[in-house]
Amino acid sequence: TLRALRAYAPGEVLFREMPTMVYDGRDSEGFYDDSLACERMLCAWRELPSDDRAAVLELYCPETALPDDFEQELGYKGEDLRVLRTVRVNSIGLNNGGGGVFLFASRSNHSCRPNAQHCLSGEGQLACVAAAPIREGDEVCISYLTAGALLMTANKRRRLLLDTWGFHCSC
């Protein structure tokens, strides 16, 4: 959970951050490939310094972050499966089509009425920007959903959030 250390007006930057790890799950033709993405996620995680690997594993990791047959289908288990679950739900899409894990930004919780949003630069730096007035001590929340998905009914949004991120939305 992120809390504001001071008040922020809409448009103000709360923080900036570079990704701790990045990966690209696209094949040579530019299509996303789940098994290739998994291999690249694990490779990127293994290349991190031990402190960063430990920090990634401290992020939210629901048991439902991967399809039920994922373990049998692709053969992952143990720590590899935990890494994949953690990276999958904490990844933020990058402008180049890959994904990145940002240790600070990944702690932003979801709201269907967010008071902040993540913006990416061309170099992959993330800025968390106030989208509404934020008071000192307020929780800083973003929407995990696209603008279009936010227009869905509450039940459809809840199903999407449960299926994708493994939590029940109470918005």
Image (cartoon, rainbow, N blue to C red):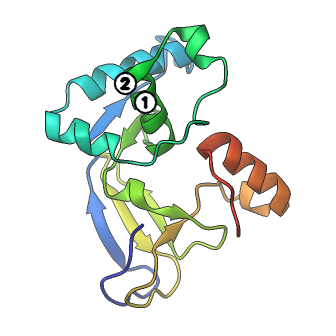
**Image coords of residue 98 (percent x, y):** 43, 32
**Whether residue 70 is situated above or below residue 98 in the rendered picture:** above
**Whether residue 136 is situated above or below residue 93 in the rendered picture:** below
Q: Report the residue marked by disc 2.
A: 79
Residue at 20% from the left image edge and 41% from the top image edge: 52
Q: Residue lying furthest front in this view?
A: 78
**Whether residue 79 is situated above or below residue 138 in the rendered picture:** above
Taking the image as drawn, is residue 151 in sight? Answer: yes
> Which mark identifies residue 143?
none
Q: Label 1: few (<14), some or many (≥20) within 10 Å?
A: some
Q: Quadrant of the N terminus?
A: bottom left
**Image coords of residue 164 (percent x, y):** 64, 41
Image quadrant of residue 113? bottom right
Q: Amino acid at mark 1?
A: Arg
Q: Report the residue marked by disc 1.
A: 82
Q: Secondary structure at mark 2?
A: helix
Q: Nearer the viewer, residue 39 or 123?
A: 39
**Image coords of residue 18 (percent x, y):** 26, 50
* Direction from residue 159 to residue 36 in the image, left or right: left
* Direction from residue 91 to residue 125 in the image, left or right: left
Q: Quadrant of the C terminus?
A: bottom right
Residue at 32% from the left image edge and 88% from the top image edge: 6
Q: Amino acid at mark 2?
A: Glu
Q: Are marks 2 and 1 in contact (CB under 8 Å)?
A: yes
Q: Secondary structure at mark 1?
A: helix
**Image coords of residue 157 (percent x, y):** 76, 55
